Structure formats: C-alpha cells, structure tokens
C-alpha cells in the first residue's frame, strides 16, 4: 500500500512539473533579459532536466503502453516531427513555440532510449532489432545516396549555406534511433540469453 502511495505521489508530481514547465515555456519570453548568463543557463537546464525526468517517470509508470510496438513508435514519431521543426523543415513563426519544439526534440531523443529499454526488457527481440535496424539504416543510406547525391558533400551543406534548410534533416532522428537500438539490443540479448541459461541450469 505504501509503494502504491509513493507511485501515485510521484505520478502527480510528474504531471505537475510538466504543467509548470509548459507554463514557463510559453509564458517566459524567449528574448527575455535574465540579468546574467548563469540565470539563463539555469533556466534552460531546469527545463531540459525536469522534462527528461518527467518523461522517464511517465514512460516507466505507463510502461504497459510502451512495451508494445505502437507505444515504442510513439516517441519516434514525436522525434521526427520535432526534428523537422527544429531544423527548419516546418518553420514556426512564434518564438516560444519554436523553443517548445526545440525542447521536445531534445527530450524525445532521450525518450526513444527509455521506450526502447522498456520494449527490450519485456520482449526478447534484441537480436532482431539489431538485424532489422542495420538493414534499414543501410538501405536508407543507399537510397539517399542514389536520389539525393553524395551524402558526404551534403553533410557540409549547412556550413556553406547556414540559412538554407538541411537536405539531410532525416539523418538526425534516424541516427538517434539506431544509436539507441544497437547498444540496448546487445545488452538485452545478453541479458535474456543469460536468464534462459540460468533457468535451464536450475531446472536440471
């Protein structure tokens, strides 16, 4: 009973912090004078760290939703959409809304890792995710090279044209997802394999 009370309290605290952060994001002007650089850094760090903590707890709290493939894909969709706004593919005129999507991009990158860990914890699909993830990564790069051109040259496009939309905007979310899948899937595969070995050894 005590554990459930703590869980309920932490969940309410998480929703309250989320509401507070949203108020701060949309009420505080992005060009506001904070008086000092340290105060500005503290404001940004508070939003990033608190939103990461809130997203982590809520994903764990509602893990039944994220242990399945549709739930796992949800933060990936959010990552792609926020990345498009963050990189200027979908321009947003309001500065506070633009700031919101920037924070959402950062938090969604972290959330992809948390949901991937949840999915792999409940499902022994680590080896399959590495195989499919590698295949998708290779095919996407090959198709992009075929239709977009030299990816190495395009990766330096924004250094030459900083005001233009990046042609490789899709690479950031793709690399983020793949970057989480490989190490977490490897750990998951080893963990599930060891558990099966121990279970087999104990049954004998």
Image (cartoon, rainbow, N blue to C red):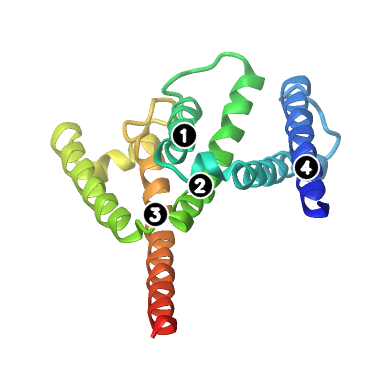
Q: Which residue is mark 3?
A: 181
Judged from this view, the residue extending furthest toward the right is 35
Q: Earlier in the sequence, mark 4 or mark 2?
A: 4
Residue at label 1? 74
Q: Which residue is mark 4?
A: 8
Please tell me whether mark 4 or mark 2 is closer to you in this view: 4
Name the mark on residue 159.
Answer: none
The residue tagged with tag 1: helix, strand or loop?
helix
Give the CA separation, mark 3 to mark 4.
31 Å
Q: Do the residues under discs 1 and 2 have CB atoms within 8 angstroms? A: yes
The secondary structure type at the circle numbered 2 is helix
Discs 2/3, front: 2
Instruction: Assess whether mark 3 and mark 1 are in contact (beta carbons under 8 angstroms).
Output: no
Quarter of image, res 204: bottom left
Residues at marks 1 and 3, CA–CA distance in whole angstroms: 15 Å
Q: Earlier in the sequence, mark 1 or mark 3?
A: 1
Q: Mark 3 or 4 closer to N-term?
A: 4
């Amino acid at each position: 009973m005590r554990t459930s009370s703590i869980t309920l309290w932490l969940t309410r605290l998480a929703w309250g912090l989320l509401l507070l952060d949203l108020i701060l994001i949309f009420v505080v002007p992005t060009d506001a004078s904070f008086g000092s650089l340290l105060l500005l850094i503290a404001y940004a760090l508070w939003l990033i760290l608190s939103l990461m903590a809130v997203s982590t707890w809520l994903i764990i709290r509602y893990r039944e939703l994220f242990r399945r493939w549709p739930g796992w894909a949800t933060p990936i969709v959010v990552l792609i959409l926020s990345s498009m706004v963050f990189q200027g593919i979908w321009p947003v005129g309001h500065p506070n809304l633009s700031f919101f999507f920037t924070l959402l991009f950062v938090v969604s990158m972290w959330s992809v890792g948390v949901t991937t860990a949840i999915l792999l914890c409940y499902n022994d699909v680590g080896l399959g995710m590495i195989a499919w993830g590698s295949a998708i990564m290779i095919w996407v790069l090959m198709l992009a090279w075929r239709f977009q051109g030299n990816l190495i040259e395009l990766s330096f496009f924004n250094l030459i044209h900083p005001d233009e939309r990046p042609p490789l905007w899709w690479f950031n979310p793709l690399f983020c997802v793949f970057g989480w899948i490989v190490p977490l899937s490897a750990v998951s595969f080893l963990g599930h394999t060891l558990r099966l070995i121990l279970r087999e050894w104990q049954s004998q």
